[in-house]
Amino acid sequence: MKTAALTPAQRDELKVLLQARRQELNAQMAQNRENLAPAEINAGSVSQDENARLKNQTREVDQALTALDAADLARIDRALELIDTDDYGLCDACGCAIPFERLKIEPMTQHCVACKSAWEQKQAAR
Ligand SMILES: [Zn+2]
């Protein structure tokens, strides 16, 4: 049976890291929306068509950024769900225990360094 080599104290430390990232990400998503808001203030100086086009563009950028952040957020939520179980800290691909030092840098990772670089090489070879 495979168990993650994490002590309860290490789990707590990672939990704090994950929660901090979660907050950061939420703040970033709010910031994205705020940054894009001023485009509407100038609405009076452009034609209605132009205004609609700008609004559309803004929405697309906003959606792209938010989608990236939302994907990260989902990974963080998943990690937070798993953190008190033996499934946390295990590589999804090979099942090995991911070292604490790596988890401290990327607490929501689902792959060990070996599997991640193998995956990246496969992506690059495409
Ligand atoms: Zn692995």
Image: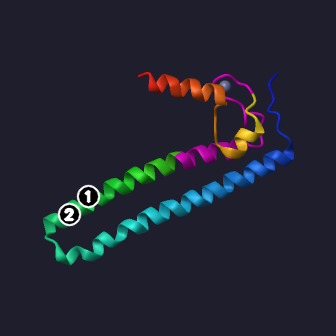
**Observer-nearest residue: 96 or 99?**
99
Q: Which circle marks residue 56 in the picture?
A: 1
Ligand 1 within 8 Å of the CB at mark 2? no
Amino acid at the residue labelled 2 = Ala
**x%, y% of residue 16?**
73, 55
Ligand 1 within 8 Å of the CB at mark 1? no
Residue at image x 68%, y 55%?
Answer: 19
- In the visual, does 80 lie left or right of 61? right
Residue at image x 41%, y 22%?
Answer: 126
Res. 107 in view: no
Q: Which circle marks residue 52 in the picture?
A: 2
Residue at image x 68%, y 45%?
Answer: 105
- In the visual, does 78 lie left or right of 11? left
Which quadrant would residue 56 be assigned to in this image? bottom left
Amino acid at the residue labelled 1 = Asn
**x%, y% of residue 64?**
39, 50
Tell me where the magenta segment starts and ends, as one range: 72-96
Q: Which circle marks residue 9 in the picture?
A: none
- Vertical order, 79 against 93 (above or below): below
Res. 25 in view: yes
Residue at image x 42%, y 53%?
Answer: 65
Q: Quadrant of the N terminus?
A: top right
- Vertical order, 53 against 75 (above or below): below
**x%, y% of residue 49?**
14, 64
- In the visual, does 110 lie left or right of 40? right
